[in-house]
Image (tube, helix red, strand yellow):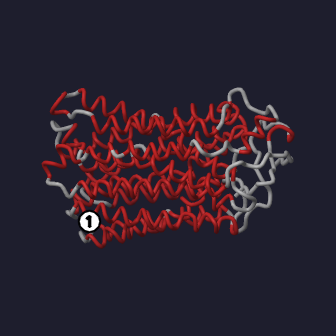
Amino acid sequence: MTITTAKIAPATTSPIKVASASFIGTTVEYYDFFIYGTAAALVFPALFFPDSSPLVGTLLSFATFGVGFLARPVGGVVFGHFGDKVGRKKMLVISLVTMGLATVLMGLMPTHAQIGLVAPILLTLLRLVQGFAVGGEWGGATLMAVEHAPQGKRGFYGAFPQMGAPAGVALATIAFFLVSKLSPADFESWGWRLPFLFSALLVVVGLVIRLTIAESPEFEAVRERADQIKVPVAEAWRRHRREILLVAGTYLSQGVFAYICMSYLVSYATKEVGIARPSVLMGVFVAAVIAVVLYPVFGALADRWGRKTIYLLGAVAMLVTIAPAFALINTGSAVGFGAALVLVFGIAMAPAGGVTGSLFSMVFTPEVRYSGASVGYTISQICGSAFAPTIATALFAVNGSSNLVVGYLVVVAAVSVVSVLLLPGRLGRPDPHGTVTRGAGAKSASTTATKTSTAGTSA
């Protein structure tokens, strides 16, 4: 580990305002991204794949859901590159507008009955745009919150953009819960479009807030030192290849479990177990609200006990709770479904979710941080989250049992447990140092690492 000291100008925006702006912005982006998952489970098979059997229609619908993740690494690379060269704030504004436009167009799009095969093709293209936009969102929002945070508080402030994910799930779920009250004919005709069109209002609110905050002080310091890298993604991979891959493995369970909970289990509970759609959506909503509350709690605990320790707690909790959760769902009780979602999505995932941003961003040095964190995060998304609902649907179809699905999720969680143990940093207490500088070919101390007056801990 190599540490040096460099003066960083104080931020012109308060840390809590930046954190709040990151939270609101990521909530809007993930609302847009997640409503597709809910629609893929509830309505897209009938509207865009009507000529297929129910099973095949669901598989195809979830496949278009997964296609969005194929564009996430591209978004992570592009936004990471320019985020490390021209600034975090500009990239966040562009990602928000891009996501909003794609989502609104989905709400206006004709179905298979109106334009035939062109409909699922257009749906897939817009999903790719969504994936591209959200691929650049997470890294930028996280860095803005973490790099503005005061000393010893990076875990807490880094939890705010992470809260946007369950908050986006909650908003998306309650939006579909409300329109599901319509008659089946009205819901399939026009009701499903309303959550997508509502995105336009959310984007305007998020955009206004994001335009009022200052650029990251650590990025400004990098720019003042003329320490910017010509090709940040390539340099991040050269310097931090091991850390990028470990970030991907660490996040694997969190990403897979999130999309299993908010997409696959919605379909599974309604179609295979027979729980009423409104009850299923309300269960997801309650679990997501609990997650929003717990994320900053675990973020704050990470500042005291160490980010790596808290993330490991979450990875182990996911591993041991998934089997009991499926047992609760398989009772066919709406209360059992809600309890299962609260157990996994609301509680078990919260320690990992609360420290993801601060843990992953501090693995990389400031001049390649946007690129390194974004690439590791999006590799995990494409390898794990992208087709998790499709894989789970196919596994259940093998023998009509959830046992194979549970086994798949246990393996995924085990990969994350091993990966987080191998990440830089110590268990049991926060690292007293600042930014971690590791990897082959790291530059000298004067150009690669920064220990700032606002530095937090590395793990």
Q: Residue 124 is drawn in which quadrant?
A: top left
Closer to us: 312 or 152 = 152
Name the residue located 63 percent from the left edge and 62 percent from the top edge: 156
The picture places residue 128, in percent across and down from the top left corner, at 41, 33
Residue 151 picture location, percent across and down: 75, 59
Looking at the image, residue 403 lies above or below residue 387: below
Viewer-proximal residue among 52 and 447: 447
Q: Position of residue 219 (x, y in %)?
A: 72, 40
Callout count: 1
Q: Is residue 291 above or below residue 366?
A: below
Percent across and percent down for residue 111 are: 21, 34
Amino acid found under the numbered disc labelled 1: Ser
Residue 341 falls left or right of residue 451: left
Q: Secondary structure at mark 1?
A: helix
Whether 62 is drawn above or below 119: the answer is below
Quarter of the figure with the C terminus: bottom right
In the visual, does 284 lie left or right of 316? left
Q: Which residue is mark 1?
A: 279
Q: Which residue is nearer to you in this view: 67 or 272?
A: 67
Q: Residues within 10 Å of mark 1 (few under 14, many from 20)?
A: some
Q: Measuring 28% from the left and 41% from the top, which residue is drawn there? A: 61
